[in-house]
Image (cartoon, helix red, strand yellow):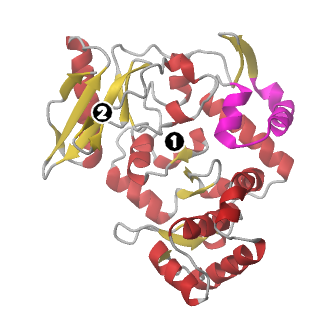
């Protein structure tokens, strides 16, 4: 099941040419950490590097917003509107406690959105600091968590999304200007589309997997499956009822193969009930070296094999790997190949990987 899922997630072979193709296949890519999220997308392509990812983001080919869980995701401009129609109200409900804690009633949030619409018109992309200053000048306290939830609510309402980078700072833009091509679907059409896209890109997966990924209710998930059931296959795997788009039929992948995944990769975060197919019994064993944690995940073939961290130097990249068990020579070579790929992504040479045992 894990190998099957890796194929559908675009990890077992590089079948995508551009960032938007990856995002279209996965529907949404978790991205509260922008840099690692870029790597999640690029590693599923042939030759996309870090600079190309920034270009796609700055051009608006891909967008970053709150759309599924209370965290950022990268989505396509064509999908952002209909996805928010289905998931936005659910995530707002999950945020209700924080809205109350921060004193954000409906009137304050509506006033904040009106200010955002006025400030961001005609491509006037602003940073969080600039927006915080704007709110404060208008008499709305907007620092730390309060600012975060004001902006998140505006994203979930379909008012704002990511703008281009301003140096290393993220900016915000109006969705109407950034994604004018967003598809207009009814709620049922959008629910059917999200259901089909999830099980196609993430299957085999269970209803509970989809619930944790999307924040939808089980009732809406069942409704979505009722609508798209004829386009999906259904099978009990490992005692779990799973849905997927097509039967397992893919080219054999050479072994050993190593993937250096960021910790929020869809292979890890796209599931809840069926996540144990990855053997996550040791996943919380995150070693530290000084203040730097080995907070990314090493996958050997289809299973978790350890953790990794990187150190960027002027002209090279150092990757350190903490392994659950020692690699043999072939596995060590596959690990170095993965490190070299990450070096290519950044545009530097990867040094020989330093390995330690957990």
Q: What is the tally of numbered marks visible in this picture?
A: 2
Residue 181 visible from this viewpoint: no
> In the image, which residues are magenta?
206-232
Q: Is residue 271 magenta?
A: no
Q: Secondary structure at mark 1?
A: helix
Against 283, residue 168 (above or below) is below
Dividing the picture into quadrants, the one containing residue 272 is top right
Q: Is residue 305 left or right of residue 279?
A: left
Q: Residues within 10 Å of mark 2 (few under 14, many from 20)?
A: many
Q: Position of residue 268 (x, y in %)?
A: 51, 31
Find out whether residue 225 is within the magenta segment: yes
Closer to the chain start, of discs 1 and 2, is 1
Q: Quadrant of residue 228?
A: top right
The dominant secondary structure in magenta is: helix
Observer-nearest of 220 and 258: 220
Direction from residue 219 to residue 3 in the image, left or right: left
Compared with 86, 231 (above or below) is above
Q: Residue at x 66, y 68 (%)?
A: 154
CA–CA distance in space, label 1 to label 2: 24 Å
Where residue 138 sits in the image (x, y, percent)?
60, 89
Mark 1 burial class by Cα count in 10 Å: few <14, some 14-19, many 20+: many
Q: Quadrant of residue 308?
A: top left
Residue drawn at 54 percent across, 79 percent down:
123
Checking the image for residue 22, the label placed there is 1
Camera-near label (1 vs 2) is 2
Q: Is residue 39 left or right of residue 130?
A: left
Q: Position of residue 59 (x, y in %)?
A: 47, 64
State the residue position of label 2: 308
């Amino acid at each position: 099941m894990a190998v099957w899922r890796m194929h559908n997630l675009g990890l077992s072979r590089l079948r995508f040419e551009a960032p938007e193709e990856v995002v279209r296949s996965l529907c949404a890519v978790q991205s509260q950490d922008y840099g690692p999220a870029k790597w999640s997308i690029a590693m599923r392509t042939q030759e996309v590097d870090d600079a190309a990812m920034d270009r796609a983001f700055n051009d608006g080919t891909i967008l970053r917003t709150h759309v599924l869980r209370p965290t950022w995701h990268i989505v396509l401009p064509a999908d952002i509107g209909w996805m928010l129609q289905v998931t936005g109200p659910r995530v707002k409900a999950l945020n209700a406690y924080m809205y109350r804690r921060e004193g954000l009633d409906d009137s304050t949030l509506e006033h904040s959105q009106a200010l955002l619409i006025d400030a961001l018109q005609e491509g006037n992309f602003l940073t969080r600091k600039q927006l915080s200053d704007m709110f404060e000048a208008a008499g709305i306290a907007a620092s730390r968590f309060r600012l975060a939830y004001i902006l998140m609510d505006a994203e979930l309402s379909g008012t704002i999304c990511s703008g281009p980078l301003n140096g290393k700072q993220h900016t915000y833009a109006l969705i109407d200007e950034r994604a004018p091509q967003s598809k207009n679907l009814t709620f049922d059409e959008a629910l059917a589309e999200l259901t089909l896209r999830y099980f196609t890109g993430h299957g085999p997966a269970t209803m509970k997997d989809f619930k944790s990924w999307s924040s939808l209710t089980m009732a809406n998930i069942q409704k979505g499956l009722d609508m798209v059931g004829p386009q999906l296959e259904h099978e009990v795997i490992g005692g779990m009822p799973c849905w997927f788009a097509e039967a397992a039929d893919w080219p054999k992948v050479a072994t050993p193969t190593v993937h250096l995944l960021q910790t929020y990769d869809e292979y890890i975060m796209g599931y809840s009930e069926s996540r144990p197919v990855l053997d996550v019994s040791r996943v919380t064993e995150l070693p530290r070296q000084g203040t730097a944690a080995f907070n990314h995940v090493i996958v050997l073939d289809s299973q978790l094999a350890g953790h990794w961290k990187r150190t960027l130097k002027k002209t090279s990249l150092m990757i350190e790997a903490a392994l659950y068990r020692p690699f043999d020579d072939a596995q060590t070579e596959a690990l170095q190949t993965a490190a070299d790929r990450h070096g290519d992504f950044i545009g530097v040479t990867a040094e020989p990987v330093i390995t330690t045992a957990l």
